[in-house]
Amino acid sequence: DAANKKGVGAKDEACASDSLEGEGDKNAKSSPSVDGAANANASAADEATQNISKPDATKMAETFSKILSQCKDSKAALQSCTSEEECNKAFMGMTVCAGQYMCPLQHKSLLETLDSVSGSNIDEEMAEAKINVAMEVLGECVAKYDKRAGMAKKQHADVFQKVMA
């Protein structure tokens, strides 16, 4: 289907569960890096050694619970999209919705960018570039948060089960 061709399918599955886990890996692979293999190895090593405290895991679980209750429309759009364009829009919607809880500063920056370009005399190409950068920054933040929350869920599954129940 169109979602899988674009690589959005895996993101749909991640959002179909009770977390956004898995989204970070897809975004990280699509981001250009100087040495992707070295970064992937370093990332795996960081993940294996990074301990997340129980209070941090609790905050992350509460954030995911909030996202699941507040981003229902975005999640439903991801689960029901049928075309590449529709799935891309749905994924963007889910990122923006989740971003307000995971990455409030980057979310605010995106909203400010949208406000600054709407109705301004800035040319369309420049406006689109500014929005794309702000969206990319938010997407990267959400992916990093999601990856860290995935580690927290592995280390403190009991906390996530309790909060998500």
Image (tube, helix red, strand yellow):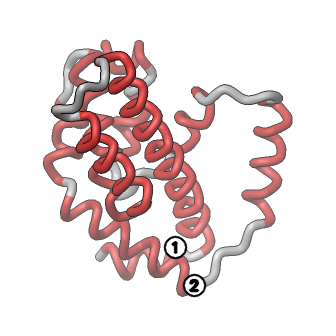
Give the amino acid at mark 1: Ala
Front residue of 100 and 128: 128
Most extreme residue toward the bottom is 55
Image-based side of 100 in relation to 40, left or right: left
Give the amino acid at mark 2: Lys
Check disc 1 and report its element: helix, strand or loop. Answer: helix
Residue pointed to by mark 2 = 54
Is 109 drawn above or below residue 136 in the view shown? below
Front residue of 24 and 101: 101
Give how far apart the Cα atoms at labels 1 and 2 are: 10 Å
- The residue located at (29%, 76%) in the rendering is 165
- The residue located at (60%, 37%) in the rendering is 28
Classed neighbour count for the residue bearing mark 2: other residues with Cα under 10 Å, few (<14), some (14–19), many (≥20): some
Most extreme residue toward the front is 121
Residue pointed to by mark 1 = 157
Image quadrant of residue 69? bottom left
Label at residue 85: none
- The residue located at (38%, 81%) in the rendering is 162
The x and y percentages for residue 31 are 61, 30
The x and y percentages for residue 48 are 77, 60
Is 152 drawn above or below residue 4 in the view shown? below
Check disc 2 and report its element: helix, strand or loop. Answer: helix
Image-based side of 44 in relation to 10, left or right: right
First in sequence: mark 1 vs mark 2: 2
